[in-house]
Structure formats: C-alpha cells, structure tokens
Image: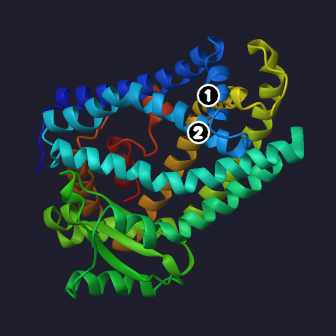
C-alpha cells in the first residue's frame, strides 16, 4: 500500500491540479492564438485543397487543430500522468504502456467524435442560429447511449473484467442487492493494478448493462467489511438514482451552455473577421466559448456530485451499520490514492467531485 507524509500528499495533489489547470489554459489560449493570428483561415484553405466537400474539409480541419493541441499539451500530460505518478510510486506502467493507453483513448474517441462533429455541422447549416436545440437533443441521446454501452464495449478495451468468484463476500453483496429493486448483470473485478496502485470501485451502466466493478487493488488490500462498505456506497448511488440525476443535470447544463454559447459565438464572430456561423475557420471560436462555459460551470457540477457522494455514504452507513469499517475504508483509500484529507475549502468547492475524506469521516461519525 502506498504511504506518504502529509506534505507529500499535499504537494502531489497541488501539482496534479496546477498541471490540469495549465493544460486547460494552454488549450484555450491556443484557440485564441489560432483565431487572432488568422491561422484557422489558413487551415480551412488547406483543408479545402483536399476536398470541396465541407464535411470532409471539416474533418481535416479538426484533425489539424486537434493534432496541434495534442502535441503542445503532450508534455503536460506526460508529466502529470507518467512522471508524477512514478515519482510518488503510484504507477505500474512503463512509458510504452502509458503511451499505448493514451493512444488507445484517442482511437476509441475518434469514431464517437467524428459522427458528432459531422452532425453538429449539419445542424449548424440546416437550423442556423437555432442549431443548439437539435445538438442538445443529440448529445442527450449519446450520453444515455454511452452510459448503456460503456461497460460492455468501451471498458473491456482498457481492462479485463472478471466475474467475482463465489465467496462469503459475494454472497453478502448479492444479499444486499436483493433487498432493492436493482437488477445487476454481474459483479466484476477489473485489473486496475495494470496501470496504478490506487484502488477504485464503480457502479456503471443502465438497463441491462448495469454492473458493479471492484478493482483488484481494492479486493487485495481491503477487508471484507470494508469492501461491503464500498459496495453499499455504490449501491446507494443506484438507490438514489444518481446516474439518471447526473444525466438530467448534464442535459440541462448542455442546453443552457449551447444556447448561451450560440449567442456569444454569433456576437463575437466579427472580432476575428468572420461573418458566418458556418465558416469552418470560425468554429474554434465556438469551441473556445464552450470551453469557457465548462470551466465556469464546473463548480456547480462538482457541488451536485459531492451531494450525491454524501447521500451514498449515508446509505452505506445505514445498510452496514459499521461506522468503524467506513472510517477505515476512507483512511485506506486516502493512503492508497494519495488523497488530500483536508484540502483548502475553496479548492474543494471549485474542483473536488467528492467531499474531502475528513468531511466524509466527520459526517459518518455524526450519523452514529
């Protein structure tokens, strides 16, 4: 199990956060530079030399912009995802393995992103300033679809999912499930240890694709009582319909964001000499506004996520009636994942999707 002093933990989390923010700022700044310098116009002209079809030109244009961003941000991603993880003895990957996993993520995202980009451009040309409405509907459908297929199609591309062996632990988990209306396709262990020493668990999927996932690192380092606590927490997310609530919030946020972005995009076209919302060279401006909206609304999404985590914690405590196991679980997770137990309140409010370990333990002890 990974161990580190409090200062090391805080340093690790600070560096991870700073690098993530810098990467975001670099990506947004790149868009501004490309727009202000007229490079997007040049890229559009270059793309049209391959095809007069605007959809093919759009794909070439997007590949150019995406490629430049990937190259520029690669050192930051490499430092945060590989160097830093090895420095704090968390990673189990060689550089080649890390690079392959990163490449695989890109390869998996391409067949999802390409049709969405083409559909978006079709709606932009067809619906004009009202493009945001059909785009929002499509994104809702895609988010539900991905929630359905991710455990079956996408996750197995990255991890081996193995049905949990018959054991007293599995029997207790199944007994807990039977007390709810939940139907799960299965309880699986996944080989998280191939990439990291960290531990994790998740409730994934909707409909017939619902699965409970427990990392092999969790199963190896935690007691049965602690794993029961983790499972009960994940079950709490289902009982409280957190996945559907998250999809609902995400959908509302998407519609508001797309609408606001459409207004900002149209109003700011002239800043960079554009006159049409369908001009391919202008689309990075739309991406810039979407990026800024996501950044500004991040604390709201995190606040809702933290509330969901508290609900799931309370459910776990009610089901297991084992506060001691909950506390030891939180402390082990903090140690293994190098989680900052007591981050600065502002940092937690802005960037944490989960309450701090200290607050989760305090809430559990108050509930006794």
Q: Is residue 217 visible?
A: yes
Q: Is residue 270 above or below residue 158?
A: above
Residue 243 at x, y percent in the picture: 56, 63
Q: Is residue 199 above or below residue 56?
A: below
- The quadrant in which the C terminus is found is bottom left
Packing grade of label 2 (10 A; few <14, some 14-19, many >=20) is some
Query: Closer to the N terminus: mark 1 or mark 2?
Result: 1
Residue 62: image quadrant is top right
175 left or right of 243 in image:
left
Please name the residue shown 26% across and 80% down the image: 164
Q: Is residue 236 above or below residue 199?
A: below
The residue that disc 1 covers is: 46
How many angstroms separate mark 1 from mark 2 (CA)?
Answer: 9 Å
289 left or right of 233 in image:
right
Residue 279: image quadrant is top right
363 left or right of 9 in image:
right
The residue that disc 2 covers is: 60
Q: Are the two marked residues, 1 and 2, in contact with CB atoms closer than 8 angstroms?
A: yes
Please name the residue shown 50% across and 31% down the image: 350
Residue 339 at x, y percent in the picture: 28, 41
Could you say which is closer to the camera, residue 244 or residue 144? 144
Q: Can residue 317 be seen in this view?
A: no
Please name the residue shown 81% across and 42% down the image: 124
Q: Is mark 2 on a helix, strand or loop?
A: helix
Residue 67 at x, y percent in the picture: 47, 33
How was this image coloured?
rainbow
Could you say which is closer to the camera, residue 7 or residue 117? 117
Could you say which is closer to the camera, residue 321 or residue 279? 279
Packing grade of label 1 (10 A; few <14, some 14-19, many >=20) is some
């Amino acid at each position: 199990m990974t161990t580190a002093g409090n200062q090391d933990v805080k340093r690790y989390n600070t560096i991870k956060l700073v690098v993530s923010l810098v990467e975001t700022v670099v990506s947004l700044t790149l868009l501004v530079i490309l727009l202000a310098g007229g490079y997007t116009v040049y890229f559009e002209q270059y793309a049209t030399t391959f095809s007069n079809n605007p959809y093919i030109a759009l794909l070439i244009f997007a590949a150019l912009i995406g490629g430049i961003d990937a190259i520029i941000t690669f050192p930051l991603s490499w430092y945060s995802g590989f160097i830093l993880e090895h420095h704090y003895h968390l990673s189990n990957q060689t550089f080649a393995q890390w690079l392959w996993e990163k490449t695989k993520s890109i390869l998996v995202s391409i067949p999802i992103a390409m049709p969405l980009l083409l559909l978006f451009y079709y709606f932009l040309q067809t619906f004009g300033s009202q493009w945001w409405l059909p785009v929002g509907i499509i994104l809702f459908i895609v988010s539900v679809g991905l929630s359905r297929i991710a455990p079956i199609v996408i996750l197995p591309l990255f991890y081996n999912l193995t049905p949990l062996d018959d054991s007293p632990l599995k029997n207790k988990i199944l007994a807990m499930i039977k007390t709810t209306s939940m139907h799960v396709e299965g309880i699986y262990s996944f080989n998280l240890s191939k990439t990291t020493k960290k531990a994790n668990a998740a409730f994934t999927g909707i409909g017939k694709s619902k699965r409970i996932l427990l990392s092999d690192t969790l199963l190896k380092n935690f007691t049965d009582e602690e794993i029961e606590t983790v499972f009960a927490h994940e079950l709490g997310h289902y009982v409280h319909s957190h996945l559907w609530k998250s999809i609902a919030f995400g959908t509302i946020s998407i519609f508001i964001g797309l609408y606001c972005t459409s207004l900002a995009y149209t109003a700011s076209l002239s800043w960079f000499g554009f006159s049409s919302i369908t001009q391919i060279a202008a689309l990075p401006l739309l991406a810039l506004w979407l990026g800024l909206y996501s950044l500004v609304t991040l604390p709201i999404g995190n606040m809702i996520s933290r509330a969901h985590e508290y609900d799931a914690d309370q459910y776990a405590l009610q089901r297991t009636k084992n506060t001691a196991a909950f506390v030891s679980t939180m402390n082990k997770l903090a140690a293994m994942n190098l989680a900052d137990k007591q981050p600065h309140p502002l940092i937690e409010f802005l960037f944490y999707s989960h309450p701090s370990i200290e607050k989760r333990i305090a809430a559990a002890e108050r509930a006794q």
